């Protein structure tokens, strides 16, 4: 199961709407505790795929290292990744599996239909390595975001 704050979930869905008809991508940040993944925020990434941005995504490795470092300073881990499927179902493709390398992390896919966020699904990358890795369906469980500071 993937626990995710409502604001992080809204944030990644909005990101997909903004980059439509191209794919968006980003990183899920929070806590990894054994089997439990809890996302408190998302970091948006630029999609570096210029050849086919409608159905492929790629996160710049340098950007990922920077995001990881900033997360660690806040005591957070990389819990997974997200991307959008413009006008396609929120199901993983063989390319998505081939390009997923973080065993134990969650891969969230949100469908964007005609510019509006549709279904959002999450898949945990199981297995022990590149030979037997596989995506496992997992529930997304949103939790309320921390209340914003009171305005004066
Ligand atoms: Zn995909």
Image (cartoon, helix red, strand yellow):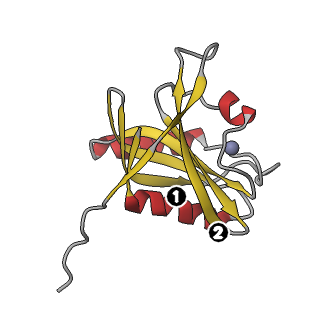
Q: Could you say which disc has been placed on residue 12 in the image?
A: 1
Above or below — where is 88 with respect to 97? below
Q: Could you say which disc has been placed on residue 135 in the image?
A: none
Where's residue 63, x and y in %?
A: 53, 46
- Spatial separation of the CA atoms under disc 1 and disc 2: 12 Å
Where's residue 94, x and y in %?
A: 74, 32
Is the N terminus in the top left, top right, bottom left or bottom right quadrant?
Answer: top left
Image point 24% across, 68% down: which residue? 147
Is the C terminus in the top left, top right, bottom left or bottom right quadrant?
Answer: bottom left
Q: Are marks 1 and 2 in contact (CB under 8 Å)?
A: no
Image point 55% across, 61% down: which residue? 13
Task: Kindly tell me whether mark 1's CB lies below 8 Å from ligand 1.
Answer: no
Q: Residues within 10 Å of mark 2 (few under 14, many from 20)?
A: some
- Which residue in the rendered view is the most extreme toward the right? 51
Image point 39% across, 60% down: which residue? 6
- Which residue in the rendered view is the most extreme toward the bottom? 152
Q: Ligand 1 sits in which quadrant?
A: top right
Disc 1 is placed on an element classified as helix
- Residue 59 placement: quadrant: top right
Which sits in the foreground, 40 or 58? 40
Which label's residue is closer to the chain start, 1 or 2?
A: 1
Which sits in the foreground, 90 or 18? 90
Label 2 belongs to which residue? Answer: 116
- Viewed as shown, does residue 137 lie left or right of 148? right
Q: Residues within 10 Å of mark 1 (few under 14, many from 20)?
A: many
Where's residue 30, x and y in %?
A: 35, 44
Disc 2 is placed on an element classified as strand
Which sits in the foreground, 133 or 57? 133
């Amino acid at each position: 199961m993937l626990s995710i704050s409502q604001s992080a979930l809204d944030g990644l869905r909005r990101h997909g709407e903004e980059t439509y008809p191209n794919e968006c991508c980003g990183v899920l940040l929070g806590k990894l505790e054994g089997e439990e993944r809890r996302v408190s925020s998302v970091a948006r990434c630029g999609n570096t795929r210029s050849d086919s941005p409608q159905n492929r995504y790629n996160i710049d490795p340098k950007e990922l290292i920077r995001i990881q470092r900033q997360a660690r300073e806040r005591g957070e881990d990389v819990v997974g990744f997200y991307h959008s499927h413009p006008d396609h179902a929120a199901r993983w493709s063989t390319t998505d599996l081939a390009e997923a390398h973080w065993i134990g992390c969650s891969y969230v896919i949100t469908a964007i239909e005609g510019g509006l966020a549709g279904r959002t699904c999450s898949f945990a990358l199981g297995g022990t390595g590149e030979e037997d890795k596989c995506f496992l369906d997992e529930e997304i469980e949103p939790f309320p975001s921390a209340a914003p500071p009171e305005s004066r």
